[in-house]
Amino acid sequence: MTMSYEQAKDRLLDAALNHVAFDGWTDETFRAAVADTGLDAGYARALCPRGAVDLALAYHARGDASMLERLAAEDLSELRFRDRIASAVRFRLEAVTDKEAVRRGATLFALPAYAADGAKAIWGTCDAIWTALGDTSEDVNWYTKRATLSVVYSSTVLYWLGDESPDHQATWEFLDRRIDNVMQFEKFKADIQKNPLLKPFLAGPNWLAGQLRAPRRDGDLPGSLG
């Protein structure tokens, strides 16, 4: 039976995960994955033109999809909104099947050549979280919510990578503190919007955001990689 594009890429990714802990998201890992799956090398390269870099991004996207499935299955309606955000970030980290693959990914996307890819992936995760939780903002709030959550998510991932506490309890406590920072910022913005003396100061940023705004679900960062 002929495999679909998605099935073939999934097979490559599954095979790559057996090598990432030893070789990272590298050409060596990609070649080993191709050999393990028996896929034609040319076809594999067509699936992933940048080799293991594309597989690393596919692994991140797989985690996002798992998080969204869990969000759809869980009833969070009784939780405060800040706790829904914290739950979504926690679900995303708990979707990770290979912590070392994330560690190696963090190293890869810290390189200047791939930093934009890493930032775009994180932005996509945070956009998915806000959208799944029902965010309908259209102005500068669309950006600031995702930007602040991107900082929270990134810092939490780095903390989680080094966390050896039972059940990652220290990470969840760290996450709660960072979420509090986000909610304080959102409250600050709301207070400005309500203040007739301060609201005019947001007119410029709101107008600029309206001019730059990208499609909401393509995961694009504003002004990059379009």
Image (spheres, rainbow, N blue to C red):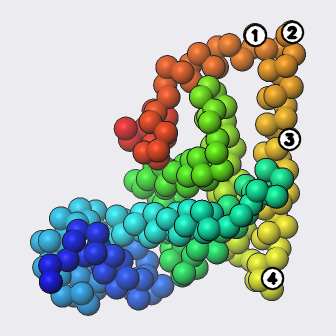
Q: Which residue is mark 1?
A: 200
Q: Distance from label 2 to label 1 (Cα)?
A: 7 Å
Residue at 20%, 77% (x, y): give it: 3
Q: Which residue is mark 4?
A: 165
Q: Disc 4 or disc 1, which is closer to the eye?
A: 1
Q: Is residue 106 visible?
A: no
Q: Amino acid at mark 3?
A: Gln
Q: Amino acid at mark 4?
A: Ser
Task: Identify the element where label 4 is drawn.
Answer: loop
Asked if the residue at tag 3 contacts the one at tag 2, i.e. Cβ–Cβ closer than 8 Å, the answer is no
* x then y, percent, for residue 131: 59, 47
Residues 128 and 149: in front is 128
Decide: few, some or many residues near mark 3? Use Cα within 10 Å; few <14, some 14-19, many ≥20: few
Asked if the residue at tag 3 contacts the one at tag 1, i.e. Cβ–Cβ closer than 8 Å, the answer is no
* x then y, percent, for residue 41: 15, 77
Tell me the quarter of the image containing the C terminus. top left
Q: Amino acid at mark 2?
A: Leu
Q: Which residue is mark 3?
A: 184
Q: Is residue 159 above or below residue 18?
A: above
* x then y, percent, for residue 38: 18, 87
Residue at 64%, 57% (x, y): give it: 154
Residues 27 and 132: in front is 132
Among the 4 quarters of the image, the one containing residue 26: bottom left
Decide: few, some or many residues near mark 1? Use Cα within 10 Å; few <14, some 14-19, many ≥20: few
Q: Disc 4 or disc 2, which is closer to the eye?
A: 2
* x then y, percent, for residue 211: 49, 20
Q: Is residue 203 above or below residue 115?
A: above
Task: Identify the element where label 3 is drawn.
Answer: helix
Q: Amino acid at mark 1?
A: Pro
Q: Which residue is mark 2?
A: 197
Decide: few, some or many residues near mark 2? Use Cα within 10 Å; few <14, some 14-19, many ≥20: few
